[in-house]
Amino acid sequence: MEKEHYTIQGLSNSNMKTQVKNALEKIEGVNQVCIDMARETVEVMYNNPATSSKIKSCIEGTGHNIE
């Protein structure tokens, strides 16, 4: 299992958190998504066919920037 950790700007409320979490969980192969709003971080655990680039694209597709 792979693990990615991202710092994301703008995770300021629970609606944004839910939006990002739901979007990531739709990617085939994503097993777990942990979001810490206080630190503005996202941790994603995944297997194939999910990839780091798919995860990054998904996060950016929700309107958030990865630092």
Image (spheres, rainbow, N blue to C red):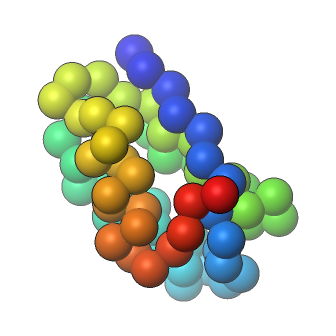
Q: Give the residue displayed 33% in from the left and 72% down from the top.
A: 61
Picture quarter containing residue 30?
top left
Q: Give the residue displayed 36% in from the left and 48% down from the top.
A: 55
Residue furthest to the right in view is 38
Tell me, yes or no, if residue 10 can be seen here. Answer: yes
Picture quarter containing residue 63?
bottom left
Residue furthest to the top in view is 1
Q: Give whichever of 31, 39 is nearer the camera.
A: 39
Expressed as whole percent of the image width and height from the top left, the position of residue 59 reads 42, 62
Expressed as whole percent of the image width and height from the top left, the position of residue 7 reads 67, 54
Tell me, yes or no, if residue 31 can be seen here. Answer: no
Residue 23 is left or right of residue 27, and the answer is right
Q: Give whichever of 47, 6 is nearer the camera.
A: 6
Expressed as whole percent of the image width and height from the top left, the position of residue 17 reads 56, 71
In the rendered view of the protein, which quadrant contains the C terminus?
Answer: bottom right
Residue 11 is left or right of residue 58, and the answer is right
Residue furthest to the front in view is 67
Expressed as whole percent of the image width and height from the top left, the position of residue 43 reads 58, 42
